[in-house]
Amino acid sequence: MIARRALGICLGLLTCGLASLAPTPALAEGPEESDDFSPFLELLLLGFDDASLDTGWIPQGSPVQMRFYASASNSVVMSLPGDAIYDWEEETLRFEGSPLAGVFEYDVGLELQASVKVDVSVVQWESDLLGPYDWGVDELVEFTPYLLPGNPDRPASIVQQSDAFPLASVPLIPDIVILSGNLDIDLFVDIDAQFECERIEVLDPGGEIVSFTNEDEILPVDPGEGEDDLVLPATAYCRLRTAPTLIINPHLVMEVAFQEYDIAGIDIPIDLPVVDDEIAFDTIELTFPRWEAPEPEDTGDTGESGGESGEDGGSADEVGDEVGDTGDTGGDDLGGEYLDDGCNCSSTDAAPERGLGWALGLFGLVALRRRRRR
C-alpha cells in the first residue's frame, strides 16, 4: 500500500514536471521597412546670359565719363537625404533625416567690365574695355533634414555682409602725354538666404493625403488591402527666401592737360532675384514590401497534453484515495500523516528541471523502500 501511495505522488509530480517543460509560443513582432527619401533640387535663379547691365556713359554731361557692363548669376542647391520608415505592425509612417547630411548652397557670381572716355577741348580719348573683373561667393551650410518645425537646425541660413571692398584698381596711361589717371572699383555685398521645409505630403492607397508638419512626427497610414507592395507617393514642400544686394562704387581720377577731374559718389546696384516662394520638390514614390502578420502558433496539442496530464493527475488522486482507505497503518509506517490526495504543484518557466528532478527522485525512493522490505 505504501508503494502504491508513493507511486501516486510520483505520478502527480511527474505530470507537473512535464508541464513545466512545455514551450511557450513567442509573439511575432511586425517589421519596419525603410525606403530612401532624399529630395534634391538645384535652381538657377539667374544666369549670366539671362540679364546684363549697361550703365551708359556716366555722369551725363561730364567731359570725363565711365561706362560699366555687368552680368551676374545666382543659383541655389537644396539636398535633403534621409529615409521613410513604415511600421507594418502599427501601420504608421515616419521620416528620419540623415544626420548632418542636408545641404543648402547659395552661389552668386559677378562679371564686370569698364570703359573710360575723355572729351576735353582738343583731347578726345576712349579706353579699351577694362576687365573682365570677376567676383563670386559660394556659401554652404549643413544640417539634419527635414527642416520641419521642431528641427533645431531650422532654418538653414546663409548671411554675408561686408563694407565696400576693393574689386579692382586700374591705372590709365594712354599714349597721350597730357592724359593720365586711375580707376578704382569697390563692391558692397549684403546676402541673406534662408531655407526651411513646411510639410511632407503622402498620398495613401485610399487617395487621402497625410501631411507631416513636424520633425520626427509619426502618423498612421492605412496600407489598404491586397498582396502588392505598399506604394506611397511623397512630396516635400519647402520655402526659399533670398535677398541679395550687390552695389558697385567706382572712383575715377583723371588729369587732362594739367587739369584734374575727380568723379566719385556713384552707386551702381546689380539686380539679383529676391525670392520668397514655396518650392515643391519632385515627388518620390516610396515602396514597402507587403508584410502579413504570422498566424498564431497552434496551441491545441499543448492543451490536449495539459488535459491528459490533468487526467493523469486524477489517476494519482484515485491511487491516493485507495491508499487512504487502508487505514492508519500506512501513515504510521511512513512516520507521519498523509494529508494531500493530489499533486498540488505548479509549473514555472524559471525552473522546469526541478519538477522533473523531484519526480525522478521519488521514483528512486519507492524502488529503494520496496527493495529493503524484501
Image (cartoon, grey):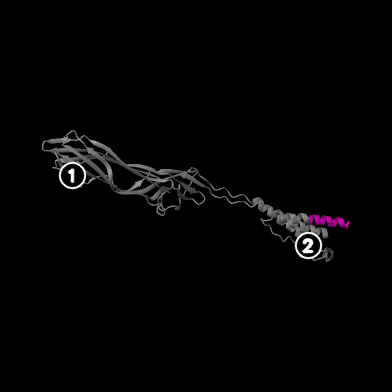
What residue is at 78 percent from the left and 61 percent from the top? 320
Q: Quadrant of the C terminus?
A: bottom right
Looking at the image, is mark 1 or mark 2 nearer the viewer?
1
Observer-nearest of 356 and 179:
179
Q: Nearer the viewer, residue 86 or 162?
A: 162
Q: Residue 258: percent from the left, percent from the top?
A: 14, 40
Numbered tag placed on residue 321 in the rendering: 2
Q: Nearer the viewer, residue 363 or 256?
A: 256
Q: Would you say 72 lies left or right of 199 here?
A: left
Q: Is residue 259 magenta?
A: no
Q: Residues within 10 Å of mark 2 (few under 14, many from 20)?
A: some
* Residue highlighted by disc 1: 262
Q: Quadrant of residue 257?
A: top left
In percent of the image, x 40 and y 49: which residue is there? 200
Q: Residues within 10 Å of mark 1 (few under 14, many from 20)?
A: few
At label 1, the amino acid type is Asp
Prevailing SS of the magenta stretch: helix
Would residue 24 be found to the left or right of residue 281 on screen? right
Residue 66, position as x, y percentages in the image: 19, 40
Q: Looking at the figure, which quarter contains the N terminus?
A: bottom right
* Range covered by the magenta-colored residues: 362-374
Give the mark, 1 or 2, whose residue is nearer the N terminus.
1
